Structure formats: structure tokens, C-alpha cells
């Protein structure tokens, strides 16, 4: 098979415990997602699916445990509920919309 | 009817079935750049060695007008033959017959040849080229898959199982290859996935081609599902044949031994490959080739997790499994994927009585939130488990750095290695000099008039005192500090004297490895 020529000294470095090693980096390493502190005011989808029904409007006051929407995913109508009290700032999805995983659905004030 | 006429009748019947799905379907198969199932078997096996069984098997499905359909051989070919004289059981799905779809009788043929392989204790090769379950046969086709998976699991570690993906292999069908020892894929021909592009589009609205989702390249580079990647079917068959020469027929036999050949020392100068500075990279495969017979190394999973290198070579004509950190890629660190890759290979070697040689040069485990959250603890534990559990001869050569948890994991004395050798440039320590000096001499460095100067001084002090093989050798953790050019001789000797190794573990049903 066609192999990439690896004889040249790599120009990239990897830092382990303060030592900088000259080495090739894999795309999996360079493309890795940077970790960010999750924002408790943003609700992301945890599974890809279709938004069947939205129960809240922007500006609406909600209580913990209140129904936010029904997200149909994997042939199951999942009821999504608010995990804390608050006021809905923005609804980013429409009924009937197909959304992937980790999609911003609702933001709170 | 005279016997002569009966023979003629047989010949006619055979001729008809051997057409598979007929001219048109064969034309289509060829247009896709694929060989037919029978051509594949004949090309792979020794000339004139293939004998086919169950040629006249027919399906019994009655629903959805299936009773009016004749499917030659029910879409799969089974038989026996040889590769370089080694007995082989083989099956190949015939895409020209109902898309190679798997119905009950199709599956029965496959399980029959698998059972045969188990009884005869010979390798089984499965060539996959199938559109999936035969929907018309309903739960019977699911039963068929399940019966294959069950046999794959039972045969695991008893006979070598090889899967060749030469077409689509989708949905539940992918789990048979996943349960086998080695998966071969070919560019533009192999396609493997659980849910295909159409389902992904319907559910997610994401459009992706079959190739980008589960093509040969993807499974060789990204997922690690495939072990060997080829550009063509012919190249793929050559790889399979080569693999067969390295592995035994079953777990109670030794792999075939070959004539011993010296490595090509003009091409691979063992004294000159590894740079003195632990931060400088090199290709560890050059070290392997400087040691093995004829400088031959048959690498497995070359394109995936290439920060660790695994594969077969021979020492004095005997097959040996090599596990090596690769400083050229990601400094040779252990991480989620490389631990997975190495651990599975170590267990393969252990199951089939192949001695393991470990070449060590690593700075430790890869730091990072993604690694921690991907479970580097439980994945990294696999390599410890696999080495500790293995009872085949286990020999380690520490080429250069061996720091921290990585040192322990790479078949150290503490995991019951049989022999541990170290080159004079080995640095066996809890961590690299920079990091260690910063911690141990933190106070001195901070309080110094010139902290940078003090830091340098302390790093050098640490280097001199601990970055060597003699601290470990003084404790007997390293058996012998050796010159690079003595490596091959010592490995040959170590394997020779380990021939009758007995390492009895306590009786148990099985352990609980960190899967």
C-alpha cells in the first residue's frame, strides 16, 4: 500500500510533563474538541431527533420539572423537562424540526 | 437411467448452480470492480485445492412469493481448501444471488462450515459481501446471524478467524467480523456500518456517503475495526496468505517455523537508529527490522493508533508478536486507542502461544480532558490486564525512556515479564527530568537568586542520578543492561530458554477484564 514518507524529522511537538517531544500529531489529537465549562442556562439535545411539541414561549416563567418539549428520537417520544426554575430567553427550535445531538434548543435568562 | 446419464444429470445441475445469480448479476458485480464469490475463493486458496459443499442447498421460505424463487446455493459458497498447504475452512457470500442476503439456509451453510472448522481445528475465513438480512425470511434471518455470532465467540481463541469485507456488511452483519481475530478491507469495495447513510439522513438530516461513513479507509484509520487495508482484492488476498504463514492452525499447535535468516544489518543499523536525546523521534519499526529474521515485519493496524506499533516478525524462524511504542507519533504515548490496540494483540498472542517482545520508549499516558472523559483509566487498564494475564514468554527491551505508569504498563518486571533488558541509554524513572526536577526541587528553584539557572542545574542533577537503567538494574527490575547490537542474540536466547515455560494461574471460569 501507499505509505506516507515518515523519514523526515517532524516539526510538531507534544508536551508531556514539561518535556517537549518532537513527534507527529494525529488528526484525532489535533481535531479533538476543546473542553468548555457547560453553561447551566443553555439546554442542548442529548440525542438526535425530531421536535414534536414545544410547551413554552420566550419570556415565560418556568418551574423545575415543568415540561419543555417532546423530542421524538429512536422511535420514542421523550419528554424533556426543565432542570431548574427560570425564565425562557430564547427558543432555538421549531415544532417539526429535526435536530442533531448537542444542538442548542433553549436558552434561559 | 444408466449411471452415465445420472452423471450427466449431475453435471448439468452443477453447471446451473455454478452460474450463481446469472450473467446480468455477474456483469453488475464486475462493474463494481469486484470479483465473484467463487473467483475470490479460487484466487485466495492454493491452486485446485478448493472443494465446495452444500451446492444444492435451497431455501424453504414461503411468504412474499419466495416459494417461486430459486436462489442458487442460497447466496453463499462454503468449502475447504488450503493456503500454502495449511488446511482452511472458508465461506463467501455471493452478492449476485439475492444480493448475498442472509436467510436461514444461507446461515445454516455458514454455521456448518464454522462447526467443521472447529471440529477439525483449522482456521476459518469468511468473505462478506451481502446486502444484509433477507427481509422476507423475517426472524429466521435474525436467528441465522445470532447462530453465527455464537459460534464466532465459541471459536475465539481456539482457531484463527479471519473476516474479509469485500462489499457491503451492514447492520447486525458487522458483528461477526467484529468478533473475529482479523478484519481485512479493500479501498472503495468494503463498507461497514450499523446504520447506513439513508437512516442517518432520515433521522438526523445529515448527508454522508457510504465511503465516508464506513469505507475501508475509515475503518483502518479512525475506528480500528479493520486490521489490514489493501488497494485491491488481489493485494488483500496476498495479505491474508502472508498472515496465515505467521499464525498456528489452532491454539494447541505452534505456528509453522521457517529457516532462520539474519537481519539486513547494512540497511538497519541498530546502533544508529535511536537518538541519544529522549526528545528526538525515530521510527521504532526500524529497530524491529534490525532484530527480526530477514528484517521482515508484518504490521497490524498500521494506520490506526499508530503511536503504538503491533505485528508479527520471526526470530530464528519462530513467529514472535511485537508490541512497541512509536516515538514518531504522539511521542509514543499510551492513550485510549493505543491501549485498546495493544491489549487485544497481546491477548491474541497469548491465546495462540506466540511469544511477545515489547520494545519500550514512552513518556507516559497522554494528558487531556478528552482522554480522561473517554475513559483512559479503564482503557489504559486493558494493557495492564493483558500483559499480567499472558502466560506466553514475555520479553521486554527498554530502548530509551520508560516513565511512570507507562513504564509499569509496558510489560515491566512487576507484571511478571520473563526477561527485561535495557539499552544503556534507557531512562527508567517516575517521570521526565524536567517535570521531576520542578516538583522535587521546587523550593530550591523558587528561592534561588537565578531560578532558571537553578532549575537547569537541578534538571541535570536529576538526569545524571535517575535517568539511566542502573537504578532499576540495582533492584533487579532490569535483568541485564545490554548493547543494542546484543539485542537479537539475547532475544533468541530468551525465547529458546522459555520453550517449556510454566505459569499456572489460579483456576477460574474467566477474569473480568476492563472491556
Image (cartoon, coloured by chain):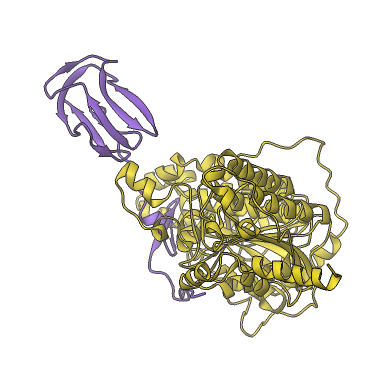
Chain colours: A purple, B yellow
How many numbered markers are drawn? Answer: 0
Pick the front one: A40 or A14? A40
Q: Quadrant of the rendered structure where residue B130 is? A: bottom right
Q: What is the x, y in percent for residue B223?
A: 49, 54
Q: Quadrant of residue A96?
A: top left
| In the rendered image, the vertical position of residue A26 relative to residue B282, given as above or below | above
Residue B37 spot, x, y in % from top left: 61, 66
In the foreground, B420 or B385: B385
User: Residue A88 in the image: x percent, y percent?
Assistant: 16, 23
Quarter of the figure that contains the C terminus of chain B: top right
User: Vertically, is A96 above or below B291?
Assistant: above
Single out the residue that lies furthest toward the front. B1
Is residue B358 found left or right of A26 in the rendered image? Answer: right
Query: Looking at the image, which residue sits at the far bottom?
Result: B266
Q: Do we see residue B66 in this rendering?
A: yes
Residue A44 visible somewhere in the drawing? no
- Could you say where residue B241 lies in the image, as x and y percent from the top left? 68, 71
Residue in the foreground of this view, choosing between B43 and B100:
B100
The residue positioned farthest toward the right in the image shown: B500
Residue located at (71% from left, 52% from top): B477
Q: Is residue A6 left or right of residue B423?
A: left
User: Which quadrant: the N terminus of chain B?
Assistant: bottom right
Residue at (80%, 71%) from the top-left corner?
B5
Could you tell me which residue is drawn at 33 percent across and 38 percent down?
A48
Amino acid at each position: 500500500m501507499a505509505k506516507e514518507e515518515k523519514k523526515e524529522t517532524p516539526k510538531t511537538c507534544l508536551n508531556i510533563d514539561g518535556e517537549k517531544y518532537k513527534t507527529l500529531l494525529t488528526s484525532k489529537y489535533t481535531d479533538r474538541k476543546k473542553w468548555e465549562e457547560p453553561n447551566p442556562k443553555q439546554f442542548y439535545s442529548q440525542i438526535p431527533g425530531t421536535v414534536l411539541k414545544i410547551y413554552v414561549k420566550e419570556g415565560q416563567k418556568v418551574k423545575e420539572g415543568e415540561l419543555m418539549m417532546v423530542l421524538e428520537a429512536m422511535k420514542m417520544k421523550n419528554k424533556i423537562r426543565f432542570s431548574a426554575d427560570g425564565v425562557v430567553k430564547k427558543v432555538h427550535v421549531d415544532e417539526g424540526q429535526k435536530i442533531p445531538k448537542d444542538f442548542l434548543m433553549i436558552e434561559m435568562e | 437411467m444408466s449411471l452415465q446419464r445420472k452423471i450427466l444429470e449431475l453435471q448439468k445441475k452443477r453447471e446451473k448452480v455454478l452460474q450463481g445469480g446469472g450473467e446480468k448479476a455477474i456483469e453488475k458485480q464486475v462493474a463494481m470492480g469486484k470479483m465473484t464469490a467463487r473467483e475470490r475463493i479460487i484466487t485466495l486458496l492454493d491452486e485446485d485445492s478448493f472443494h465446495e459443499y452444500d451446492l444444492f442447498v435451497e431455501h424453504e421460505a414461503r411468504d412474499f412469493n419466495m416459494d417461486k424463487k430459486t436462489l442458487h446455493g442460497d447466496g453463499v459458497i462454503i468449502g475447504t481448501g488450503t493456503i500454502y498447504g495449511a488446511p482452511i475452512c472458508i465461506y463467501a457470500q455471493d452478492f449476485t444471488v439475492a444480493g448475498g442476503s442472509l436467510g436461514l439456509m444461507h446461515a445454516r451453510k455458514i454455521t456448518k462450515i464454522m462447526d467443521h472448522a472447529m471440529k477439525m481445528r483449522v482456521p476459518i475465513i469468511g468473505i462478506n459481501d451481502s446486502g444484509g438480512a433477507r427481509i422476507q425470511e423475517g426472524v429466521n434471518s435474525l436467528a441465522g446471524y445470532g447462530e453465527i455470532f455464537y459460534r464466532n465467540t465459541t471459536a475465539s481463541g481456539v482457531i484463527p478467524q479471519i473476516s474479509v469485507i469485500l462489499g457491503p456488511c451492514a447492520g447486525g452483519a458487522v458483528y461477526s467480523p467484529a468478533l473475529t481475530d482479523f478484519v481485512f478491507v479493500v479501498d472503495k469495495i468494503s463498507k461497514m456500518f450499523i446504520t447506513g447513510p439513508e437512516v442517518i439522513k432520515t433521522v438526523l438530516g445529515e448527508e454522508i456517503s457510504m465511503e465516508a461513513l464506513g469505507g475501508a479507509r475509515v475503518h483502518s484509520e479512525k475506528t480500528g475495526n479493520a486490521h489490514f487495508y489493501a488497494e485491491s482484492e488481489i493485494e488483500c488476498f496476498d495479505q491474508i496468505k502472508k498472515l496465515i504463514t505467521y499464525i498456528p492452525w489452532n491454539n494447541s499447535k505452534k505456528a509453522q517455523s521457517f529457516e532462520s535468516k539474519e537481519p539486513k544489518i547494512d540497511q538497519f543499523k541498530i546502533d544508529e537508529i535511536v537518538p541519544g536525546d529522549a526528545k528526538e523521534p525515530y521510527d521504532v519499526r526500524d529497530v524491529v527490522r534490525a532484530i527480526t529474521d530477514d528484517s521482515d515485519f508484518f504490521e497490524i493496524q498500521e494506520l490506526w493508533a499508530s503511536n503504538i506499533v503491533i505485528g508479527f516478525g520471526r526470530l530464528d524462524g519462530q513467529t514472535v508478536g511485537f508490541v512497541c511504542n512509536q516515538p514518531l507519533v504522539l511521542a509514543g504515548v499510551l492513550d485510549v486507542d493505543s491501549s485498546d490496540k495493544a491489549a487485544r494483540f497481546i491477548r491474541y498472542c497469548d491465546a495462540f502461544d506466540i511469544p511477545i517482545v515489547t520494545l519500550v520508549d514512552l513518556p507516559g499516558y497522554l494528558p487531556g480532558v478528552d482522554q480522561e472523559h473517554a475513559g483512559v483509566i479503564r482503557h489504559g487498564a486493558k494493557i495492564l490486564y493483558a500483559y499480567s494475564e499472558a502466560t506466553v514468554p514475555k520479553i521486554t527491551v527498554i530502548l530509551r525512556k520508560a516513565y511512570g505508569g507507562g513504564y509499569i504498563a509496558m510489560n515491566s518486571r512487576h507484571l511478571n515479564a520473563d526477561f527485561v533488558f535495557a539499552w544503556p541509554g534507557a531512562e527508567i524513572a517516575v517521570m521526565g527530568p524536567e517535570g521531576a526536577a520542578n516538583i522535587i526541587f521546587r523550593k530550591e528553584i523558587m528561592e534561588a537568586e537565578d531560578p532558571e539557572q537553578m532549575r537547569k542545574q537541578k534538571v541535570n542533577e536529576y538526569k545524571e542520578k535517575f535517568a539511566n537503567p542502573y537504578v532499576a538494574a540495582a533492584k533487579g527490575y532490569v535483568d541485564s543492561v545490554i548493547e543494542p547490537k546484543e539485542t537479537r542474540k539475547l532475544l533468541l536466547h530468551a525465547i529458546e530458554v522459555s520453550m517449556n515455560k510454566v505459569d499456572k494461574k489460579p483456576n477460574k471460569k474467566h477474569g473480568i477484564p476492563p472491556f
